[in-house]
Image (cartoon, helix red, strand yellow):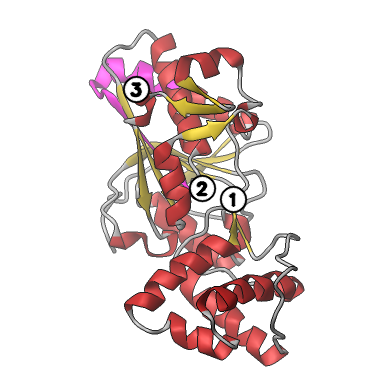
Amino acid sequence: MVTVANSLLTQSETYSEYNASTMNDKQFARWVELLELRIGVRASALRKTFLTNALDIRLQTLGLQNYNEYDDYLHSGNQGEIEWFELIDLLTIRETRFFRHNSSLELLQDYALNKLSQFKNVGQQSLKAWSVGCATGEEAYTLAIILDQTIKSAGDKSCYFSVMASDISHSALNAGRKGTYSSKQLNKMDEKLIQQHFTALGNNQYQISGQLKIRVCFNKVNVLDISQKNIGQMDIIFCQNLLYYFEHDTRIKILNKLTEYLATDGILILGPGDIFQWDNPDMALVKGDNTLAYRKSASINPGTNK
């Protein structure tokens, strides 16, 4: 199983110019099951057209005649594994931007300031954050900008910070590693921040600064099978606009697993409405307006595999 960047099989957009095949209900049920087993997300029956049109693009590209042939192709060893990446990229609509949810980012800044004040007493000199479902990197770089600005505003020259950014899509991760964005993608940002952290390349393109870029590491991580990765402890886990695409029980499993990689007193910041009735004895709800976040109140050996 793998995780998704943002939205999968839930968008109204279609690739109607293809639509070369007809999928019956039995075939659709098969593909729903296949995708759920592979990526953990259940396709809504109301989005059948989106799925079929995406599959038709791959059929045409590969010169295959029907969905059964494509199913066989996906299970044909190495070439099938490579094709999965192509299909997932096609099904994934990445909707992200810089400084997306101000209330959550303000909570992050307050948390970071509080941790910096604690460091003076305990000697810790680093902050580690994780952007889960980072898409093309806007969220991850936003976290890096906030941590950089917060550390500088606190006058702490010794604190090091890093951001791990994870997603399912190779093309999205590669875009994040490149760190080049259009002026449209930056239009919600303060002009001073753009001047501080980006270099204008011309043609309305901007490059994230090298100083900030080296603080963000992009990795392919499966939130449904995190134990396969050596992630370690995080002070901050930022997971927004991802859980919505999973069934409630799966959301609970994902959150419980994420807490294992959260350091004691670390904070898990979700999107408002991402989860209801989650009761984890090691996590305490953080009060805040228009935010949903939890703080880890006790250690459960974070970062160890179970």
Q: Is residue 64 left or right of residue 296?
A: right
Quadrant in which the N terminus appears: bottom left
The residue range painted magenta reads 111-133
> Farthest top residue?
155
**Where residue 108 appears, x then y in whole percent?**
51, 29
Q: Residue at x 73, y 60 (%)?
A: 13
Q: From the viewer's side, name the closer residue of 45 and 289.
A: 45
Earlier along the polypeptide chain: callout 2 or callout 3? 2
Q: Residue at x 29, y 12 (%)?
A: 157
Label 3 crowd bin: few (<14), some (14–19), many (20+), radius 10 Å: few
Quadrant in which the C terminus appears: bottom left
Earlier along the polypeptide chain: callout 2 or callout 1? 1
Amino acid on which the number 3 mark rests in the picture: Gln
- Tag 1 residue: 94
The image's mark for residue 211 is: 3
> Farthest left residue?
123
Instruction: Say if the magenta span includes residue 124.
Output: yes
Amino acid on which the number 2 mark rests in the picture: Ala
Q: From the viewer's side, name the closer residue of 299 and 61.
A: 61
**Where residue 144 appears, x then y in whole percent?**
43, 28
Q: From the viewer's side, name the closer residue of 170 and 138.
A: 170
Instruction: Say if the magenta span includes residue 274.
Output: no
Q: Is residue 224 visible?
A: yes
Q: Residue at x 71, y 89 (%)?
A: 25
Residue 276 position by quadrant: bottom right
Residue 249 position by quadrant: bottom right
Mark 3 vs mark 1, CA separation in Å: 26 Å
Work out whether 73 lies above or below 98: below
- Tag 2 residue: 135
